[in-house]
Image (cartoon, grey):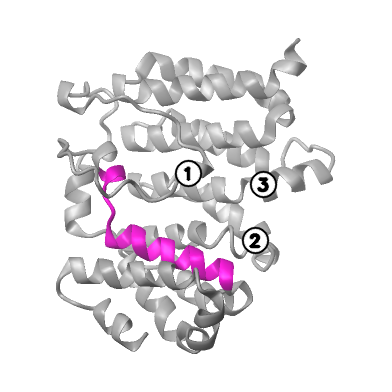
Amino acid sequence: VQFMMLSMKDGDSFVRLEACDFWAELSYYPMVASKVLLAYLPQLVPSLLVLMVYSDDELMELGTDEENDTSIADRPEDIKPQFHKGKESEARQDEGDEEEGSGGMEDYMDMWTVRKSAAQALDHMAQQYPEQILPILLPLVDEQLSHSDWLVRESGVLALGAIAAGCEDTVQSHLPKLIPFLIGLTRDPNSMIRLVTCWTLTRYASWMIERHENAGLPSDSLMVKSVEALCSCVLDKNKLVQAAACSALSEFEESAGLILEPLAHPICKTLSQALQIYQVNNMTLLLDSVSSLFEGVKEGMA
């Protein structure tokens, strides 16, 4: 454990990657992990958060220089088949696929990076030790979210999404304040923060949907406000944010089903507007959102 923690600070990114991968592998042996890992969580969690910040190479691969690029046509070499990825599809990509791409979100999604490995490790640890990890993590994330560097703020939002499944019960008391904060971040000036916030909101979708139902389906619930925020991001001027928002909206549509019927009209209006401005690459994700909405509310429309 000590060696792996030291290796996470190595100057070679491949060494850092292997060290981060170790923690997820260790979680598959809970009896062993619980004996040696718990004592190191106060040192390990901050180290993982540091590695969840985008590297310069990742930013270059994503091509984040252009904030408002919705009117820029996709290059022919960038246009690839796309498919909506549900929760079961978020696993690590096949390591044997080493085909070089031309850059962009699709190629980045095929890469296994230190950032992704660190987030996966945090996810696994949150599932193993939710009560122990949350008191360590939340003060650190609170500092990140108020940091002057957008890269650090973005990694804090990623961390909140990473712990959602594992800390589902322990984090609930914080969600009435956390979710409105995340909704506000969908209007952040930085496109990468808007992007990761779309994903993080979906990680808490089941809690919002259940709370919405239990409250009698109010028109101003956090679920409704989240869907409205995602609809705004669907019409974002940045193509990466558009893609993230469409995927996130599809997740809400699939999870909420008929519950979204009162919002069907404004969602349809948003998707119709998006059809007028989207470039080729995001069109499949947009049509997937249309399909998911129809599948969810079709019984109420019959």
The residue where tag 2 is placed is 168
Q: Is residue 134 left or right of residue 77?
A: right
Image: magenta residue range: 108-128
Tag 2: residue type? Glu
CA separation in Å, label 2 and label 1: 18 Å
- What is the magenta segment's predominant secondary structure? helix
Q: Is residue 46 visible?
A: yes
Crowding near the residue tagged with mark 2, few <14, some 14–19, many ≥20 C-alpha atoms within 10 Å? some
At 26% across and 26% down in the image, what residue appears? 80
Identify the element where label 2 is drawn: loop
Identify the element where label 1 is drawn: helix
Query: Which residue is more in the foreground, 97 or 68?
Result: 97
CA separation in Å, label 1 and label 3: 14 Å
Residue 30 picture quarter = bottom right
Mark closest to the chain's N terminus, 1 or 3: 1
Mark on residue 198?
A: 1
Identify the element where label 3 is drawn: helix
Query: Which residue is more in the foreground, 296 or 171?
Result: 296
Mark on residue 206?
A: 3
Crowding near the residue tagged with mark 3, few <14, some 14–19, many ≥20 C-alpha atoms within 10 Å? some
At 44% across and 23% down in the image, what residue appears? 286
At 31% across and 68% down in the image, what residue appears? 51
Mark closest to the chain's N terminus, 2 or 3: 2
Q: Quadrant of the C terminus?
A: top right
Q: Is residue 140 left or right of residue 264?
A: left
